Image (cartoon, rainbow, N blue to C red):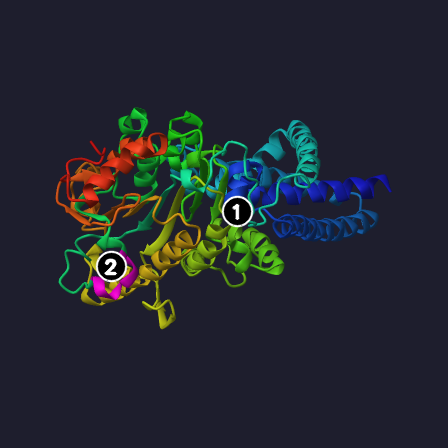
Amino acid sequence: MKQLCNLVILCLVSAYVALLPQFYAVYNRETRYSLEWSPQIRASIWMAIGILAAIYAIIYGSFYITAHYANRKQARVNCERIVFNAAIWVMGLLIVRSVISIAYRTGLMPDTITGIVDASKWIIYGFLPIGLLIFWRKGYERLILNIYRLMTVMFVLFCVQSLWWNVASGDTNYTVSSRYTGNKNDDNSIYILMFDTWSYEATYGNPLFSITNMPHLQEFQEHAFLFREAYSPGIKTEVSIPRFLYQADKRIHTFSYDELLKLVENNRLADLGMESIFDLSANHFKILVGSIIHYPSIVGERLDYMRNIYYSGAMYTLTDRVCSLLHSQLSFLAKIGLKQLGKTISNQEQWNHKVANTQLRIRMVVNEVLPKLPRRNIVYFHFFLPKEPFLLKRDWTLRDTPDYGGMTDHTPTASYMEKYLENVYAMDMVIGDIIHHLKLRGEYDSSLIVILSDHSLERGKTLSWAVRDQDTYGPEKHIPMLIKYPNQVRGGDVSDPIVATELHPLFKLYLNNPDTVAQWVSNWNAGETQWTTLSCE
């Protein structure tokens, strides 16, 4: 009985080690938000571990029983020892594979080491453990068994911890803090609508574009400022968004493109404790609703509410999740040259599913979140639109044939631009939903509303991302930007160059001294002042 219990425990721990590269990210609280940690995900991990452990136990048990009967027939070769050594080899292989995989995925493995591993798979996974078993058998056995004793503790802790981790339910209810002591007339909220890949040249600068196809934006523009020479702070979302959110902190501007991208990809940006636009007022609620990039590792936990537009639960069943985890073991066989069984889902297919889910859920999430917001907010939305995929018509109905985009040589074709403009026109439905809810809440007139984009369309790749990003006023950064001041009724057209990271003085002024802004707007509406700067001087 003791041997059977030891076998069960060892198989469970081996399965945990084998699958760890597929779910190690759940140990990070911020990543659990991105994954939308749920009882379904937890159950899928437990079930996959259990199934894989059962497979290990059946295989080992079958070989061991066969070896036991073989030993009874002859005494020259200890078949049970051979089976045990083979099990030790597999256990060592699982440890090495998991360490290498996690080190690679977390960016801790240098490129040179990655190249060596890729070129030496059979040596690392096959010949090296076998050599250790031959020439250092007892020491190697002790090492592997001691490691697995440690992994047993980790496995038990994982099972216990996973019961206490917060579940991402997607509920949008709020607990109104005592920070807000004013009344409805004191509202001075900021609403930022950040779209993705909205290009000035492809829209306002394009003769084929017509604002009449966007009636909500057209109405908004009549009492807002349109900035015709606005530029995003980066040509890539992962760089542009952090620069925008942390524009009030001088440190963000000291990082090069590559340095900032590495901080974001390694989930280290929030640890720097920089001042974000959410920190410009201590008396406002801080709300973020975004998608695609991992916002928890960018802004940390300093917000009152954060919501991911993407929802994996709408796409994957429990069976899908379990099969995906188990299938990863077959994928590993392909890496060492063995034929992979079963159908695989390519990275491109997974990406297509994710972006489609993200795009189609935009209006649903907006209509869930806005009615439940507290008053007096700093609200930031990031919408994966008008960037491809091209799934929608301008009235938000689905296309007959979805198109996941892609530009030949990164130069927009006529066909691409036709579908891109249809996505731009579909943006108007989102803008209309937001305006509708703000009017119902009585906040449309009293709020500062900013509509812009994280970057423009990508152009030719003759130069690297980092080099192209250095051009402050490059075409890949040229975006539309509209700002409606509180109670503004007279529109304006601004041709002065402006970068989106120059908005924080206006944000700070309105959040902390709204009367100053109100007086300037009153003068502007009456035609008593001309446009000078954002700061309402």
Comes first in the chain, label 1 or label 2: 1
Seen at 24% across and 42% down, the residue is: 232
Q: Nearer the viewer, residue 14 or 140?
A: 14
Q: Main secondary structure of the magenta part?
A: helix
Label count reads: 2
Work out which quarter of the rendered image holds the C terminus and state it. top left
- Please give the label number shown on residue 456: none
Seen at 64% across and 30% down, the residue is: 140
Marks 1 and 2 sit apart, C-alpha to C-alpha, by: 37 Å
Q: Position of residue 405 (x, y in %)?
A: 30, 61
Q: Quick one: label 2, few (<14), some, or many (20+) residues within 10 Å?
A: some
Q: Position of residue 443 (x, y in %)?
A: 39, 47
Work out which quarter of the rendered image holds the N terminus and state it. top right
Mark in front: 1 vs 2: 2
Query: Is the residue 182 above or below the residue 484 in the image?
Result: above
Residue 385 visible within the image: yes
Q: Which residue position is annotated with label 1?
A: 35
Q: Which residue position is annotated with label 2?
A: 218
Seen at 55% across and 46% down, the residue is: 22
Q: Nearer the viewer, residue 310 or 60?
A: 310
What is the span of residues highlighted in magenta in the rendered image?
211-219
